[in-house]
Image (cartoon, rainbow, N blue to C red):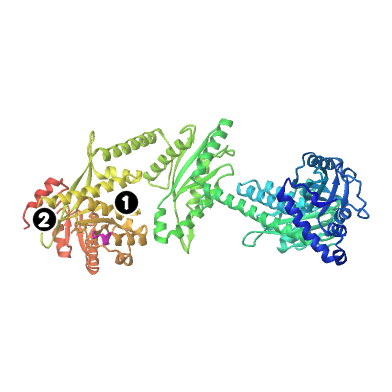
Amino acid sequence: MKLSHLGNEDADATARLMSASQRLIDEAARLFPLAAAQNDRTIWLEAMIDEVPDYLYFKDRNSRFVVANRAIVNDNRREGLDSLEGLSDFDIHPEHVARGFFNTEQEIIRTGRAMLDMEELIRDSGGRFKWLLTSKLPVRDGAGDVIGIVGIARDITERKRAESLHLGQAHLLKMIALGAPLTDVFSSLILLIEAHVSDVTGSILMLAPDGRHIVTGAAPNLDPAFCKLIEGAEIGPAAGSCGTAMWRGEQVIVSDIETDPLWAGFKALVAPYGYRACWSAPIRSYQGKVLGTFALYSRTPGEPTAECMKLVGMATHIAGIAIERKEAEDSIQFMAHHDTLTGLPNRSMLDERVASAIEAADDRGGTMTLAFLDLDNFKLVNDSLGHHAGDELLKIVAARMLRCVRASDSIVRLGGDEFVVLINGGMRKGETVEDRLRAVREAIAEPVVIEGRSFQVTCSMGVAAYPEHGRNATELLARADAAMYRAKEIGRDAMQVFTAELANRAHEKLERQEELRRALAQGELFLQYQPQMDLATGRIFAVEALIRWRHPERGLVGPGDFIPLAEETGLIGPIGDWTLRAACRQNKAWQVSGLPPIVVSVNVSARQFQEKDWVERVAAALEESGLEARYLELELTESLIMQDVQQAVETMHRLEQLGVHLAIDDFGTGYSSLSSLKRFPVGRLKIDRSFVQDLPNDSDDAAIARAVISLARTLQLRVIAEGVETREQVDFLREAGCHEIQGFYLSRPIDARALQAILCIPNP
């Protein structure tokens, strides 16, 4: 054989092979100096071939071995380098493997083209599978005819195993990312490890939520009967391999189940299945919490190899990721459909629960009941004890309601202090829906102790039934809501069942809402103005803008008839914005007409004040109208400010920076503390009309009025009394030190033209 006769069809491959051959020749020369000295090329080549760790061989045209190196001889358990001479692959490998080699080599001989870097799977004489990276090239004689092939093959089994492991890991991570069921992820993980560790059977066990018992995760090749025996077993210091590993939080290697004391109480369970060794490692969360175990069973006593435990370590890491991913997904799903404070289903779950209840009612030819309830005076608890106490109360109420209903029923928290009770299924003998709802109301009304303070809350409840009052969740909820509001109207702490009368009221309410929406769009709303006078000078220095509605059919509608509806439906926001812009424009128009500048005072709703861009909207109204900020005053109620004092103070300071004035309206009817009042950047207090109407005859009102005036003067605030109607009231207020008045004594609310006439009258 002459290597110089190698074909040149693939120049690059030939060059690589010849380069490798040259390096081997150089090495042979170093190892065999005598041969080098004698320049015996044959001896050099033989030395080179035998020292190469890869398979190196030459075959004739019939694919029979002519020359083979020591690596091939040894791996096929042959004696001597000439033991393969004359043999073919059919004499060494199974027929289907040999046929594949033969066909490839005959193709090379027929075409004269080399085949490079082929991956071939063989089984060596020891029965082990091996992957070879093989290159085969044609060998030509001096005349250029192909006389055989030369081949070199490298064992890439470990590389292929690493690639297989890497692909398996990537597939597992993809399964986890796509939310595959844990059982599927665990089974694939176990099969991956079993493919890389011979003669073992894998198992993943999980720790139950109680932290004490075992739950089967997956064991695709363990006998199901054995898995059933393990299910629910309690972990402990001597609970087999897995139960002990969970208990200790560390690896437990049992090399012989029959003799190891950890298996003393369990070896009878495993004996019928033939397992003799069990190696278990804990699966942990990212924070180190034990979630379960990964275990390998072997029918041969002994300990695992270091490589095996490395794979187990990888498996526990992936299993931990899968479990935490599933727990996070379950948590997200729970939070999406449950209230985070009480753990009750939330609004997103209500439609589903109602639909299921309706389907069940239809199946049995029965009914279901939906009750809408709202806690009475819950806001007082929040405001007097703080939001933390309010949250605690809601949790207590939720727990009490759950104790009053059955598993087939549902309690849903809609938000705030609003809940829905869904009564589904038949009643016990002698029981009615009213009985169960009454039990809910009575449980809520039991005394509550929070932060050492005892108090009692009640609820107003509205009830609607399927199919009598509605055919779906939307209809039932709307009608139960209407009934609940009726319960509040008749005195709270009551239950009201939906009726036809309530249906008419709800319909009328909806019509009024649409009318009010149309009134805003079509310009039916307008402003009137009530003057405010300085008692010391008698000068009209300001006016309060008051909204009115000129209904096309009902005529003039007072604010008391539509403002509550606007607040309830959310229309108060756009109506309030319109009022602000209109008042600013009118005040600027008065100034342009030559009237002396005055301040226009505008009431602010709670919804407006809580909007994040409220200050920006005030600034926009001033800029749009051209009115200077010092000619605008915003009236805020005590209750509005006290909903969130810190946020209110921040907003008030931002308004103050704009240059507008701030006043507290209806002072004395709220519950602001002196410490809070000192923080408010306000310029005026407005005494509520309820404390003015009986002056000066009512001694209590007189005392309150004097106290408010004195407090304001101490805090260097101006005081204005509203609802002033008589000369006697004016005299009393002047004598008590009040700065300003507003009311029918001066003028009823009038339109802009009439007010302009008053402003033109010279000051007395």
Residue placed at 46% from the left, 33% from the top?
A: 470
| Residue of label 2 | 596
Residue 78 pos. (x, y %): 92, 53
Give the quarter of the image for residue 650.
Answer: bottom left
Residue 114 pos. (x, y %): 75, 45
**Earlier-in-chain disc, 2 versus 1:** 2
Three-letter residue code for mark 2: Pro
Dominant secondary structure (helix, strand or loop) of the stretch shown in magenta: helix
Answer left or right for 587 relative to 303. left
Whether the residues at callouts 2 and 1 have beta carbons within 8 Å, the answer is no
Determine crowd level at label 2: few under 14, some 14-19, many 20+ residues with C-alpha closer than 10 A: few
Three-letter residue code for mark 1: Gln
Whether residue 581 appears in this view of the structure is yes
Residue 188 pos. (x, y %): 71, 48
Residue 679 disc label: none
The vertical placement of 478 against 641, above or below, is: above
Start-end of magenta stretch: 655-660
The vertical placement of 35 against 202, above or below, is: below
Residue 55 pos. (x, y %): 82, 53
Residue placed at 28% from the left, 56% from the top?
A: 636
Local secondary structure at mark 1: helix
Residue 608 disc label: 1
Residue that lies at the very extreme toward the bottom in this rendered image: 714
Answer left or right for 219 relative to 636. right
Task: Between residue 200 and residue 56, name the one nearer to us.
Answer: 56
Answer left or right for 253 relative to 393. right
Look at the image and say whether residue 657 sits in the magenta stretch. Answer: yes
